[in-house]
Amino acid sequence: MAQTTIAAAPGDPRGSSGAALKVRHPRRPAVEFVGPVVCLTLAVVLIVGVLLVPFGFTGYRSFFSNGLNPVYVGFANYKTIFHDPILVKSLINTLMWVVGSLVLPVGVGLGIAVMTNQLKWGKAARLAIVLPYALSGTAVAVVGGFMLRSDGAINQMLGAFGLGGLQHQWLLTWPSNTICAILVSVWQATGVAVVLYMVGLQGIPAETLEAAALDGAAGLKRFRYIIIPQLRPVTAVVVGITLANALRAFDVTWVLTNGGPARTSETLALSMYSETFLAERPGVGAAIAILLTAIVLASSWAYLRKQTGDAHE
């Protein structure tokens, strides 16, 4: 261990002869140096082994044909995605999921949080909204199926009120089956948006709202020019969460419609599973996985860049 050598001052009883004194520092435990290095190494190994290696293998597999003895086919599997009507509709459904899951949970969550923030019974209302978020996607889809199937609660209620002309095969025709799956998912996802916006509203300084009131900003004007800008960081989190959930939507659609009828309600995540394990076309399934990953990364990068640009303005 390191040692420090000092010269004895004249008259110093510890070294009247002028001999150098050696001060020995306490020895530090080796774990202080080795521990961070080991943790960093393990983190890198986990990231490479759990994320990058499977992703690299999936990308490699997407350039080979299907079957037990795959051969190199270049971008043929990617071309299949854009020439297969089922997969094209799956891509359209995924875009519908992205738009619906972005607009509805963010808009509805913000509206409910603002409207119930000052109400006495607001806690009970928010609890009713947040409760579905505690349920699994499978349970939410079962409840949605009970409501939306041909002999379900919605059609029976329409018949009871003499509105039989509005009855519809909600889950058996496109695009109503996709829209219904989005609405069921939104019913579950809105709760977390409400909670996050409530935290954001409580973080707005009272002085800011009082100053806005003195300047004559009230109602919608205060909501637009004061509250929404103050909630921008929260909105970034909510949009990020809903965007990721929309692009990997699987469980609700699978339980509610099983991707049908005739695979018309599939999203890319569901088509990836169907092509790989049901249709036994792993090359096409791998290509869909790479395409979906590219869409997620591009969407996240564009959104984060927009947020970063707005923050610097």
Image (cartoon, grey):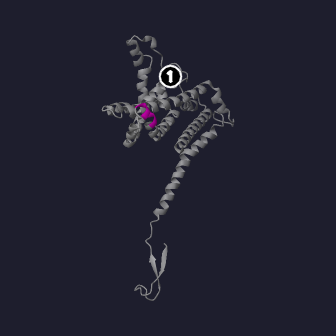
Which quadrant of the view contains residue 11?
bottom left
Classify 163 as above or below 23: above
In the rendered structure, the answer to whether residue 305 lies left or right of residue 117 reads right
Q: In this view, does 298 lie to the left or right of 238?
A: right
Residue at the far bottom in the pictured view: 17
Q: Name the residue under label 1.
A: 177
Q: Is residue 221 magenta?
A: yes
Magenta stretch mostly in which secondary structure? Answer: helix
Seen as rendered, the residue at the extreme front is 215
| Residue situated in front as seen by the camera: 175 or 253 | 175
Q: Nearer the viewer, residue 272 or 102?
A: 102
Q: How crowded is mark 1: few (under 14 residues within 10 Å), some or many (20 or more)?
A: many
Picture residue at 44% right of the left edge, 27% below the top: 141
Residue 215 visible in image: yes
- The residue shown at (51%, 58%) is 37
Give the number of callouts: 1
Residue 146 at x, y percent in the picture: 41, 22
Query: Percent from the top left, x then y, of residue 139?
Result: 41, 29
Residue 16 location (% of width, % of height): 43, 88
* Drawn side of residue 234 relative to residue 94, left or right: left
Residue at screen point 60% across, 39% down: 58
- For the record, the magenta segment spans 219-225
Q: Quadrant of residue 109?
A: top left
Q: What residue type is labelled 1?
A: Asn
Asked if one can make out residue 152 in the rendered structure from this viewpoint, the answer is no
Q: In this view, does 45 lie above or below 224?
A: below
Report x, y in % for residue 175: 53, 21
